[in-house]
Amino acid sequence: MKNTPKTKTQLMEELKKLRQRISELEQLETERKQREEEIQTQKAYLDQLFEGAPEGIVMADKEGHVLRVNSEFTKLFGYEIDEIQGQSLDKLIVPENHYEDAYSTTKKVARGEIVAFEALRKRKDGTHINVSVLASPIILDGELLAVYGIYRDISKRKKAEKKIEDSLKDKEVLLREIHHRVKNNLQIISSLLKLQSQYLEDKRYVDILKNSQNRIKSISLIHEMLYQSKHLSKINFKKYIGTLTNYLFRSCWDSPGKIALKIESGNVSLPVDSAIPCGLIIHELISNSLKHAFPDGKEGEIKIALHSINEKDIKLVVSDDGVGIPEDLDFRNTKSLGLHLVTILAEDQLRGEIKLDRNKGTEFQIKLKDVK
């Protein structure tokens, strides 16, 4: 059976389709070349970025063997490229006693985490350097292909930090010594007052000197606690209240067993500039209660409550269930030096507010501002 010859029209149609197909192929080839050029351009850009980075960069396979490093990495660790290629990265730059930490980091990156940390690493000559590291996985279609790490030498920064840390330690030692010497000097002054009182016959003057000794002691206790504290900027005021009141009960009251003491205090820490006037306020109010609230051996209770109002302010309440302050006595205008001191310290120095409640014995409510 003979093939039927194609007509001219059919041939022209096929030729048209062929030319169209050739045009499509040429277009595809042009697009392919453009994509290749784009890929080459991107590769050149990435290569330049990789090689020109100021940090050391390494790329390793998922087993941790080096695939590629930049010149900064070789400078940082002292290796030639051919000494690194294909080698285990951890064995090259991780000190033996840091293997466990390095392995833990590798596991995190293998799980897809980006990890940033600071560590000690070793150079080819065995010297150690401090580096900051950013380790990140390269994942395609959910599979870990490789990891890369960016290393920056932070040895100079670490040396500077160590210098600052040593300087701070020296200053801390000096500051502790200052608190210790202040405490000792205050104790010397207190001893001089005690010695002076032995030459006085008038009990009024003896009492005045004893009150001054107790005030000095309340200040001395703060410096002693700061000297012993881990934190030189603030003291645990609850602990201070307990120490101060224990001293006052022994110093001001002949039969301390008849007076109960109750302390309610939150976790309040105060700097020395606030702690000293607060301590003096408590000293004056407790001393006043011990001396005047329970005459003729009367039994009773003294209560101290200290709580934070907010981040800066506190509320201090000192009360007793004794005989109370006379109704006609204005504590702001009295000949009592102690109550006068309380007013000055609370209202003028600490910008606080004082209220006196006489309903059940005596209760001083004091709000102190910006003391923490």
Image (tube, helix red, strand yellow):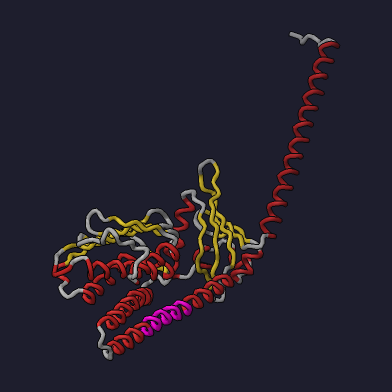
* Residue 293 percent across, percent down from the top left: 21, 65
Q: Is residue 303 left or right of residue 342?
A: left
264 over 185 or under it: above or below: above
Q: Is residue 318 visible?
A: yes
Quick one: quadrant of the C terminus? bottom left
* Residue 87 percent across, percent down from the top left: 54, 63
- The residue lying at 42 percent from left, 82 percent from top is 177
Q: Is residue 35 left or right of residue 354?
A: right
Q: Main secondary structure of the magenta part?
A: helix
* Residue 176 percent across, percent down from the top left: 41, 79
Queried whether the magenta region covers residue 37, the answer comes back as no
- The residue lying at 73 percent from left, 42 percent from top is 36
Quick one: quadrant of the N terminus? top right
359 over 211 or under it: above or below: above
103 over 122 or under it: above or below: above
* Residue 231 percent across, percent down from the top left: 40, 70
Q: Is residue 236 visible?
A: no
Queried whether the magenta region covers residue 172, the answer comes back as yes
- The residue lying at 56 percent from left, 76 percent from top is 125
Q: Which residues are magenta?
A: 170-185
Residue 277: quarter of image: bottom left
- In the rendered image, the residue lying farthest to the bottom is 199
Q: Is residue 18 left or right of residue 346?
A: right
